[in-house]
Amino acid sequence: MTQIPPEDYSDEELLAMLKPVQLAELDRQIGEMFGAEGVDRVEALFAMANVYSMRAAERDETSALAMLQLAAAMRRRAQAMVDARR
């Protein structure tokens, strides 16, 4: 059986692989990384998610999966912040 490459998973699939406690910890860490330092946190989160997604291609499969999960969590949190502004 052929395993799907990490980059072929959707954000939802990547996040579903995490246990709820892991996702909560990831959200907490992302929140700490992007505190109120005067930058647009939403744009910074989207930008960092893109960087992690691109860099994942340079890593081994396990590291790539972790980086893509982090990027997915960043996009999820950024989208929640956009939605909260509405």
Image (spheres, rainbow, N blue to C red):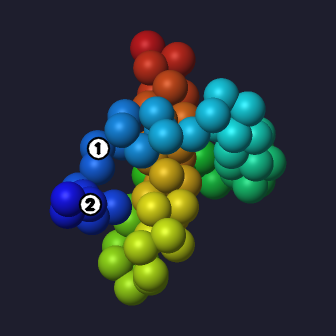
Q: Is residue 26 left or right of residue 7?
A: right
The residue where tag 2 is placed is: 3
- Say whether marks 1 and 2 touch (CB < 8 Å): no
Element class at badge 2? loop
Q: Amino acid at mark 2?
A: Gln
- Taking 65 as reference, is 60 above or below it? below
Q: Amino acid at mark 1?
A: Ser
- Taking 54 as reference, is 78 above or below it? above
Q: Image point 46% across, 33% down: which residue?
A: 16
Disc 1: CA contacts within 10 A as few (<14), some (14-19) or many (>=20): few
Q: Image point 69% across, 40% down: which residue?
A: 22
Q: Image point 75% across, 40% down: which residue?
A: 25
Mark in front: 1 vs 2: 2
The residue where tag 1 is placed is: 10
| Residue 21, quarter of the rendered image | top right
Disc 2: CA contacts within 10 A as few (<14), some (14-19) or many (>=20): few
Q: Is residue 54 left or right of residue 65?
A: left
Residue 65 horizontal/vertical position (percent): 45, 62
Of pointers 1 and 2, the one earlier in the residue sequence:
2
Element class at badge 1? loop
- CA gap between label 1 and label 2 equals 15 Å
The quarter of the rendered structure image containing the C terminus is: top left
| Residue 31, quarter of the rendered image | top right
